[in-house]
Image (cartoon, rainbow, N blue to C red):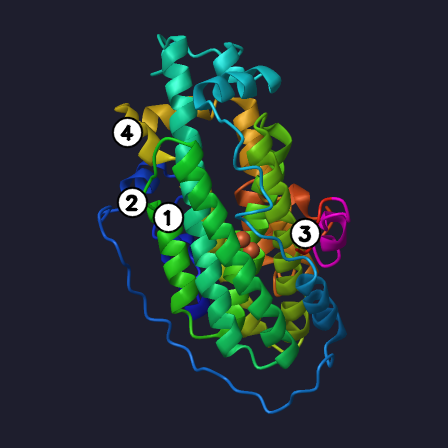
Amino acid sequence: MSTTDDLSTTEALIGRADVNDLEAILGVTNTDVNELVHHVKDNADCIFTWDYEKGRRPALNKLYEKAKSAQWNGETDLPWDTEVDQEALVMANAEANASSMFAGTVDLAGTVFERWDEQQWIQLGVESQNWMLSQFMHGEQGALVCTAKIVETVPWIDAKYYASTQVMDEARHVEVFAKYLDDKLSGHYPINAHLKMLLDDIIEDSRWDMTYLGMQIMVEGLALAAFGFIHAMTQEPLLKQLLRYVMSDEARHVAFGVLSLKEYYEGLDADEIRERQEFAFEAAVRMRDRLLQQEVWERLGIDSKEAVQAVMLSPERQLFQQMLFSKIVPNCKKLGLLDAGDGWLRQKFGEIGVIQFEDWTDTGDEYEAFALSEEELPTAS
Ligand SMILES: [Fe+2]
Ligand SMILES: [Fe+2]
């Protein structure tokens, strides 16, 4: 066995031999929930370029020009006067989407949910909303700092220009999720340990393209799919509009990753590509692990392992988990990561049950379809 093989076992990459080992996943918890600031070394050189020729990379230049005219204001362009009754919303969402656990269509006999009454299901719904929006907010801050790092580290002027617009977008995203949590929901959650590990890994990596792969392709690819799912599902008009606006930005961000890495990866050798494949797999697993919302089960005082096992009985939950990879997998394919070398990443994505999305639309051009229309774009005042 070669050294590369030793290093790329699942155990070496993610710290456990079985990717589905529930106890190991739930054993990783956030041990410092009261910390107010968190330090991470970002290990990178700041790069100046003296080549100022704008538009040398036409696709990035086009994205930059689009971004300039697609800015919105989180304070003034969203209907913040909308009343949100969180409990009523949980009920309305469950009704509109025939939520199977809530509706009793999944057999929960013998699980921790067996004797749950309506009030307990509502409480779970409320906590899940608080948790989910909190994790989105933390992820948005990750995007903010990662993209600021890209401004410093990417050697191309068109990419520095574009990334600077994304920094502004991400500040707005952190702002609107934080405001929504404070004004409309009923509690924050600290960052999930798996998400934190992933953000730390991305920021710590010294190679500029790894920031893109971790953030623009993996984290933002998942966010774009998740926002789309929740946008379609929620019965709450303010959140719906907020997500609509955020998604129009996110689609550009993922395109930024695809367009930049497509060019860069063409110049990498087989070993370097293999490192990118491994990083993509590690990120995919961390994001899957964080979806188990272990902090919610802890707060509700029920056993996390039993809760997760019961939740997984729901077909819609399984579908949701898989759908979150519907942008990531086609984008990895477009970048050549699925099949490079011996097709290592294709096999790994098969193992975690998401390879079926490989031929879905990639996000290189899809951002045009997500753009806000003239009517939606707030008029400049
Ligand atoms: Fe964002
Ligand atoms: Fe983003």
Q: CA distance from mark 3 to mark 2?
A: 30 Å
Q: Say what secondary structure mark 3 lies in.
A: helix
User: Type of residue at label 3?
Assistant: Pro
Query: Crowdedness of circle 3 by 10 Å Cα count: few (<14), some, many (20+)?
Result: many
Q: Which mark is residue 299?
A: 4
Q: Are marks 1 and 2 in contact (CB under 8 Å)?
A: yes
Give residue 324's position: percent from left, percent from top. Answer: 57, 41
| Residue shown at the point (72%, 46%) measured from the top left | 360
Q: Which residue is mark 3?
A: 330
**SS at mark 4?**
helix
Task: Indicate the amino acid at tag 1.
Answer: His
Please tell me which of labels 3 and 2 falls first in the chain. 2
Which numbered disc, 1 or 3, marks the residue that appears first in the sequence? 1
The quadrant in which the N terminus is found is bottom left
Residue 122 placement (x, y as % from top left): 41, 17
In contact (CB < 8 Å): disc 1 and disc 3: no
Which label lies toward us, 4 or 2?
4
Apparent side of residue 140 relative to residue 331 in the rendered image (left or right): left
Q: Which residue is mark 2?
A: 28
Q: Which class describes the residues within 10 Å of circle 4: few (<14), some (14-19), or many (20+)? A: few
Which residue is at 40% across, 33% downward? 130
Mark sitting earlier along the chain (4/2):
2
Segment tinted magenta in the rendering? 363-375
Question: Residue at the location (44% across, 64% down)?
Answer: 145
Q: Earlier in the sequence, mark 3 or mark 4?
A: 4
Nearer-the-camera pick, 312 or 191: 191
Q: Is residue 271 magenta?
A: no
Residue 39 seen in the figure: yes
